[in-house]
Amino acid sequence: MTEIFQALFAPASVAVIGASDNPNKVGGRPIHYMRHFGYAGEVFPVNPGRTTIQGYRAYPTLHDIGRAPEAAVIAVSGDATLEQVRLCAEAGVRAAVIMASGFAETGEAGRRRQQQLVDAANAGGMRLVGPNAQGTANFASGAVLNFSTMFMEVTPQDGPVAIISQSGAASVMPYALLRQAGLGVRYLVATGNDADLDACAMTAAVAGDPEVRLILVYLESITDPAALARAAALARSRGASIVAVKAGSSQHGARAAASHTGALVGNDAAIDAFLARHGIWRARDIGELVRAVPLYLQGHVPGQGRTVVMSHSGAVGVMSADLAERHGLPLAALQPSTLDRLGAILPEFGTAGNPLDMTAALMGKGDMFPRVLDTLGADPQADMLMVGIPVAGPGYDVEALARDAAAFSSRLGKPLVASAPQQNVRAAFVRHGVPTFVTEADAVAALAQYAGHARLAGAAAEPEVEPEAGWPALQPLDGIGLQDEARSLTLLAEAGVPVVPYRCCANADDAVAAFAALGGGAVVVKGCAAEVPHKSEHGLVHLRLADAPAVAQAAEACLATLRSLGVASPRVVVASMVRGRHEFALGVSVDPVFGPLVMIGEGGTLLELRKDVVTLLAPFTVADVKAACARLRLAPLFNGYRDIPVLDLDALAASAVALGNWALRHRGTLKSVDINPLMVMAAGDGVVAVDAVVELQGA
Amino acid sequence: MTEIFQALFAPASVAVIGASDNPNKVGGRPIHYMRHFGYAGEVFPVNPGRTTIQGYRAYPTLHDIGRAPEAAVIAVSGDATLEQVRLCAEAGVRAAVIMASGFAETGEAGRRRQQQLVDAANAGGMRLVGPNAQGTANFASGAVLNFSTMFMEVTPQDGPVAIISQSGAASVMPYALLRQAGLGVRYLVATGNDADLDACAMTAAVAGDPEVRLILVYLESITDPAALARAAALARSRGASIVAVKAGSSQHGARAAASHTGALVGNDAAIDAFLARHGIWRARDIGELVRAVPLYLQGHVPGQGRTVVMSHSGAVGVMSADLAERHGLPLAALQPSTLDRLGAILPEFGTAGNPLDMTAALMGKGDMFPRVLDTLGADPQADMLMVGIPVAGPGYDVEALARDAAAFSSRLGKPLVASAPQQNVRAAFVRHGVPTFVTEADAVAALAQYAGHARLAGAAAEPEVEPEAGWPALQPLDGIGLQDEARSLTLLAEAGVPVVPYRCCANADDAVAAFAALGGGAVVVKGCAAEVPHKSEHGLVHLRLADAPAVAQAAEACLATLRSLGVASPRVVVASMVRGRHEFALGVSVDPVFGPLVMIGEGGTLLELRKDVVTLLAPFTVADVKAACARLRLAPLFNGYRDIPVLDLDALAASAVALGNWALRHRGTLKSVDINPLMVMAAGDGVVAVDAVVELQGA
């Protein structure tokens, strides 16, 4: 951890400016918390009106302390904040938490005042958390520079979890849920407006603590993707995990974009792709954020996630199988020898299978359960176990079940969870350290997340090559706004995407000459003007023209239509007719934060209705494209389907990779690319871009 | 309630055969429960070895009681059960619960033994619950003919909920969750093997109790759809609701079926359609089964479900908006006058909108919250409210918030829920009767279910017309198995589906004559043989034939190919070429339990990959078809899209209705119908079935 984070999380001394003797005021709570939660450093309350505050000597001003505290909490009102930031920075304070609101969240004037805070702090070498921040807390050191009332109600306890959030409320909600479940939390940080040290930087900071096993993150915007990527790499490098809620997806459904790709992709797909690439699991809400925490903290290896469901109720098995299918959790296909052995152990009405119905006899016989566990443990197909206890009562030795389950899980290092609606049954399993859930639905969801996250983290990219280092320098593209078809096809050919043979012509004679030059086969004639991207709606596409008079007539018609639409220099594209085995679409939408997102999917005019698309964040590999394409509904086409032969996925993937790399090089000036259709041929015969629109930034 | 159900749920006397003095034995628990849970009738333990059992006089045999008990629990082993059933029936017992297992669930021999039980009982006018049943319980009367250990652990209390389940475990899981949340349950029935009185009949029985507001049902098979439909109608008629888990959907993903429709539809779609038609909400697991119970019990009217989210945290608003979108819960568009009034009430940094950010000031000011509620209450757009309390502590008057929220909800009769991660905050809201959840996710899901269920129940069919009464009697279709194309098209034309003009020919000369008879326009020639349903895979489809020689050549080729495939009497279909504006598919799969399911979706060879289909359970109306088609991804086509004109949805719907009614009439002999493509024309131009396979039962 850098010195700055040392200054926030384990400072030798903390000044609280705007300190209050009342522990229920914003300026009183941090003092109260440090006093009660074991902070061993010095606390300097600053308040001109008092000599002592909550038992500490108080100082009229920061200057009166006589030396620089390492950290400061600035808990004065918004108007007075700038002056205090300046004084702290001048005095040599290393880091300060700014609690006042009324800055960037209120509009442009507030944003300017906020920048003044940052400038004043940084001028003196001081870093800021906030403004509008609930603040930081380290419950290991007791340094609680945080005014949440939550810690009054739900007592902190150190543990291997860190919570980093842009929102105060979203920082304490998972805290409350974890603490009420008896789990410890070390760091709790609510960064507010992220003017200087932001939530991404804080995540990177706590990722460096070797005792942190799991970082829970709440973000409404990803202000510094590179810092978050570094945090993820650091966490992965030592086996720690990051689970994040990125809220606000409903506002990102679709961007108002000229490009079909932009409309289909939306910003949220960029966030999904970014988080997945870095091995960060995306939870959709606070419940999902905390649900699998006990599994992460236990840290057993989920293998391929093949799960055995066992219960003394057939219904639990049936429901769990439904749930496993819904969550994509594979049920283990137990080996025949395992089933034989289970058959010998189980009573008459039991079912040796998966789900495994042990019948009520499970509860009475002391050694049946451990024998079943041992048998399952010897089967390499069984990666994880779920034990459903829908009911227990007199005659059920729940304590023994819990003990046996916990012992099995520790001994083999295999994840095992229990579910039980009865509070006292859950309590027994929790006492023995078994991750325990109220419903099968939660248990299955937690196992699916845990196994899925391990897979994601295993496939996560090595620390991303900075585009500046790994790729040719950013190259500007000439032009602004929509490019006409001829220019678009030229650009794509430069990018390395195979394009249809074509000529661009300004009159019918040239069009006829182009028809001959293209070999005399059937051609398409299309109007070509940047102002008219949607050609078919204006009758500007003439297909299957097989002789010169037809070409001339089509060219004249297009040119006349373009003139009538106000195009000053109308032209036509004459292109060979190409017929693929299926029409795909390939596109790019350049996200201002994450860079180019490449979309691949079924093409044609119904692209946006069928929405059978996948997206990839550039740069990516051919293998990445193939893995993504396997998620398309039309994926079976790539292996041949009915009368459609095996399609050329290699060529499709190569074009997507080339397009992604090209978009990355030009991401400063490129806005979007729509190739629709991209004709995909039979394996070995390649792909051809037939129709394309490139949009550059500006205009 | 009929006398039989009176005999089970409020009998004057109960014999327990195989009674035990040990309350932890199967034959001891019902006695223990009746003794402790207020049963006022007589209890007759039957056990040849004892004179008293649990304080009751015991009888060596049923006969020794000297008169017929109204109900009996038969808790002897499987082998001894039949004799006891016989004795009970002969003695005049009205209804008996059979607890022993080892019957139909073990295979064919067990099924025969089970039928003997039913026959023996019914011969004496006695009805059975079970075998393999945990039994029945009525906690209002204290008649607990049930051996679950759960009631030892989680004490019963009467309330307006009934739980009916085929599984014992699945009956007590929701019971435990509800009771631990302080909610009362009146009926709890686990029916086991459903040999006589089944879960559907039990649901109908408890639906007749005017004090039951909500029935929770767990089913693994729907053994008597008509009884469940009657239960649903009865419940709806008095404003009670049914929520059901139908487990085992993962086994029903797709039937092994020759027809594409059968493969696409699966059995689970039939269940969805059946439950929806009868206003029964389908929950996917036990957690969902109980989640919205407090809303049902409160019974406020959800209107159109337009919800206002309010919190003192912006993050809760952002997350709730995401969740609302995910669950299809509409956020209320508040009226401008409401927003003006809210703006005047809220503090500086609050946001008068929806979600409504009241800031932390909410917690301090005594009258802000009720004023906000009053303002929202006056807005007819605000149907339901959700209050998110992510954190509370000193200075927060949670009690007042809970009281104000509860008063508002009762006064206006509008559903209002709270969510809070802190246990003590939830407790305050629960004390005031506010439905309360741990996470926003659960709160939003519960509201979405409650409003969605009200919509479903409002649209539910009137008690279904029995097909026997409302439709022409079942008419058998001649033939078995797959029908060739000519017969298939003939049948569909009879059904009322427009089919392409065609002729069926046995040689090339006839084919040429047919070409002329069809008007001389382009035709298609297809091989016609029931044995070869997948024509295109054998090169048996020749399109766009415009002259007699081409027709003759195609016919010869098809006939030769069919001969080479072993078809004894090969024929060809000569049909006019029809080109629609888009290719749809229309199909039927006759479910053995629910009858014909009609599928409508995008057609073409990629039908089964694109899976853009909806299903309807026959009979249904044109309006039902239109509502279902609005859920297709391609729904925008029906209003015109790009260069595709408005399509003839009226004709598509009319064909679907006709096909559904025809399938209903012939459901005894029809197995499936695949029409693909069904060419859909521009509005007013109709639809045409171009290619079809009808499959009849048998072979």
Image: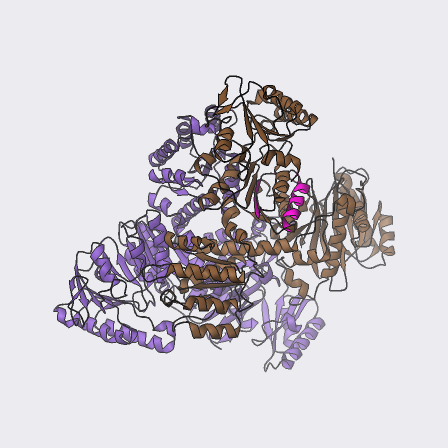
Chain colours: A purple, B brown
Taking A374 as reference, is A160 above or below it? Answer: below
Instruction: Return the x and y of residue B425 as percentages of the image width and height.
Output: 38, 55
Instruction: Return the x and y of residue A153 as percentages of the image width and height.
Output: 31, 55
Q: Can I make out residue B193 in this image?
A: yes
Residues in magenta, as a range:
B211-236
Which sits in the foreground, B327 or A588? B327
- Tally the numbered discs: 0
Quarter of the image for the N terminus of chain B: give it: top right
Farthest top residue? Answer: B49
Which sits in the foreground, A523 or B19? B19
Instruction: Return the x and y of residue B104 as percentages of the image width and height.
Output: 61, 28
Taking A417 as reference, is B58 above or below it? Answer: above
Answer whether residue B310 is magenta in the image: no
Quarter of the image for the C terminus of chain B: give it: top right
Taking B326 as reference, is A512 above or below it? Answer: below
Instruction: Return the x and y of residue B365 as percentages of the image width and height.
Output: 37, 68
Taking A236 as reference, is A547 above or below it? Answer: below
Q: Can I make out residue A9 in this image?
A: no
Which sits in the foreground, A374 or B124? B124
Rendering quarter of residue A681: bottom right
Question: Position of A50 compared to B129: left or right?
Answer: left
Answer whether residue B212 is magenta in the image: yes
